[in-house]
Amino acid sequence: MVKPKIACYITGGWTECGYMTHFLEKINCSYDYRQRFPQKNIGKKGKARKQFKIDGKTGKDLVKYVYEDIRKHKDELKKYSAILIEDDMDDQFFLESKVGRDYGLIENRKLEIQNEIHNITQNPDLKIFFLYALPEIESWFISDWENTFGTEYKNVLYNMNAYFSTTFRKFVMNTVLTEKFSLDEIENYGYISSEYQKLSDKLIFSFQEYSCSPESYKNNREYNIRINDMIKKNRVTYSKKVEGINMLQRLEPEIVARSCKHYFSKAYAELKEFNYVV
């Protein structure tokens, strides 16, 4: 049976552009998710393309590309059952107080984009999905720790992995999210001391900071010495291009939805329950 197709426009980051469609299949496997932007970095037989450039379109630039692509390929897109836009929110749509997101403004922006796509396609019934990562995809990784950071370093740390996963998670909760943000509030993460903190950057730097930290829960001196040496040699680290891609492959959307309740859980349910009828 041929699956109905969903046209996917995905933020042009290293992590998302290779395996986001596989993540979408975990949410609803009844559809064929066709990535129209960006070009996939994974070619035939799962091998990485030798000539591959990341086009970092996000926000207004990504939406502009969506409009242009739909205008150029109207007839082709008539064969699709829906359109999906995946993007990071970063520092957009915060309340004036900066204490959290203005989810009403997000819904208004979605409606503007949806109406423009309907005008272009002349199809007011075309379903448009908006899968936004608030603030970035790393919030999803933290929410599903066991399948992401908790698993990523097993092949390097071996029997030390459980210790590292437990202590590093505590460190991230205490020093990255801080007492201001619980897991249930991670989608509101961003402003600490009136300054926007980029979650991915904070996580990248947190490995070195963890290695220097004397936290009392880091109570295995032998493991600490060995792990710190691996961090120093960049054997235990985080980058969107390597570890981020690996984590996305293992990420479970159902687990993410348990923590990311402000936005992701609703977008997850909407796509999961989608049943296209010709």
Image (cartoon, rainbow, N blue to C red):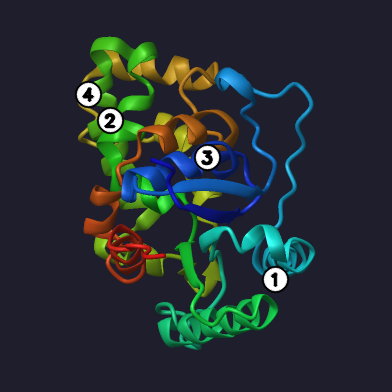
Q: Residue at x 31, y 71 (%)?
A: 262
Q: Residue at x 46, y 82 (%)?
A: 107
- Mark 2–mark 3 Cα distance, whole angstroms, equals 15 Å
Q: Residue at x 56, y 47 (%)?
A: 34
Query: Which part of the image, by quadrant, shows the N terminus?
Result: top left
Estimate how packed mark 1 is, as few (under 14), some (14 to 19) or many (20 or more) residues with alpha carbons within 10 Å.
few
Which of 85/273 is in front? Answer: 273
Q: Earlier in the sequence, mark 4 or mark 1?
A: 1
Q: Residue at x 27, y 67 (%)?
A: 261
- Mark 2–mark 1 Cα distance, whole angstroms, equals 37 Å
Residue type at mark 3: give it: Ile
Residue type at mark 1: give it: Lys
- Mark 4–mark 1 Cα distance, whole angstroms, equals 41 Å
- Per the image, the residue denoted by label 3 is 204
- Mark 3–mark 4 Cα distance, whole angstroms, equals 20 Å
Which of 172/124 is in front? Answer: 124
SS for dot 1: helix
Q: Residue 75: where, in percent of width, then height?
A: 70, 63
> Which of the two discs, 4 and 1, sits closer to the camera?
1
Question: Which label was assigned to residue 60?
Answer: 1
Question: Which label was assigned to residue 165?
Answer: 2
Q: Residue 38: where, in percent of width, then height?
A: 68, 47
